[in-house]
Image: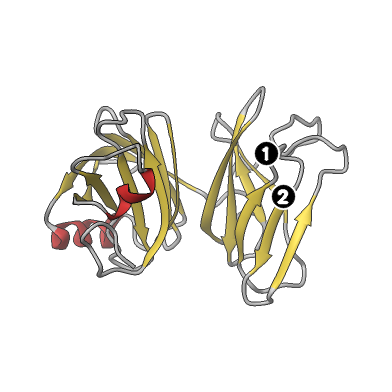
């Protein structure tokens, strides 16, 4: 697999920032203990043939985090030095997997540290929070953002624990959507129908794919009265 001219990595997930069509950015995580997060910038994007952009000439940058004294926030930079980025990844975001971009925010997870990292793409700052809340005690894997009429939710698959599906709302509150009492395989392949009323996911090593719907018939971004948020 190639990311621009970079062909050496255990690449996992992909996201993009196309707010500026003249200078789009594409991001790829690398699932490795020192896996560097990549940002790829095409030199001359041609939107008349968008399918060619990802195989055109471009520049690959690598993420370096600079944590503050508390470790839950800081600044970041992009570098052309892959080795420096790998050192930062090993210390600050090993085993990066799921990634999503929305507006000026880029979200990605470190499965090893069980954290969600949010980069502000405009001002060079970031925050980091633990995903270990209540029943969500496994490693965060893939993430999927859905936007509804009243709120935005970030959904997570899980590797470890009871291998469920969990979510985080805009206020940073976590809750569990479902979990398994039987499967020991990680959940993966998370997707939603266009109306967000059906959720699809798989238990990876069991070879099983499920379709889930809410009992009240509401979409998965819909409000409900009996949500129990995980405080810790």
- At 29% from the left and 68% from the top, the residue drawn is 9
* Residue drawn at 62 percent across, 71 percent down: 204
Q: Quadrant of residue 106?
A: top left
Where residue 151 appears, as percent x and y from the top left, is 63, 27
Q: Residue furthest top?
A: 150
Q: Which residue is mark 1?
A: 229
Disc 2 packing (10 Å; few <14; some 14–19; many ≥20): some
Task: Answer with left or right where residue 152 lies relative to residue 90.
Answer: right
Give the residue displayed 30% in from the left and 33% down from the top.
Answer: 121
Q: Where is residue 174 drawn, in percent x and y?
A: 61, 41
Residue placed at 66% from the left, 54% from the top?
165
207 vs 127: above or below: below
Q: Report the quarter where the C terminus lies.
A: top right
Q: Which residue is mark 2?
A: 199
User: x, y percentage for residue 12?
Assistant: 42, 62
Residue 123 visible to an observer of this rendering: yes
| Residue 120, x across and y down, in percent | 33, 32
Q: Image height check: is 218 above or below 204?
A: above
Horizontal placement of 179 versus 5: left or right? right
């Amino acid at each position: 697999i190639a990311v621009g001219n970079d062909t050496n990595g255990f690449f996992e997930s992909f996201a993009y920032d196309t707010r500026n069509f003249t200078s789009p950015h594409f991001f790829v995580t690398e699932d490795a203990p020192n896996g560097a997060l990549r940002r790829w910038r095409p030199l001359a994007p041609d939107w008349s043939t968008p399918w060619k952009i990802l195989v055109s000439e471009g520049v690959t940058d690598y993420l370096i985090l600079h944590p503050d004294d508390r470790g839950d926030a800081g600044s970041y930079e992009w570098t052309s030095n892959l080795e420096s980025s790998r050192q930062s990844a090993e210390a600050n975001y090993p085993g990066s997997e799921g990634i999503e971009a929305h507006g000026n925010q880029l979200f990605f997870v470190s499965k090893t540290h069980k954290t969600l990292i949010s980069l502000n793409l405009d001002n060079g700052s970031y925050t980091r929070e633990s995903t270990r809340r209540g029943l969500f005690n496994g490693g965060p894997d893939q993430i999927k953002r859905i936007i509804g009429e009243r709120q935005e939710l970030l959904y997570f698959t899980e590797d470890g624990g009871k291998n469920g599906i969990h979510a985080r709302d805009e206020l940073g509150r976590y809750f569990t959507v479902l979990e398994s009492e039987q499967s020991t395989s990680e959940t993966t392949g998370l997707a939603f129908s266009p109306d967000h009323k059906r959720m699809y996911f798989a238990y990876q090593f069991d070879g099983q794919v499920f379709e889930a719907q809410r009992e009240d018939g509401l979409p998965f971004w819909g409000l409900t009265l009996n949500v129990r948020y995980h405080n810790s």
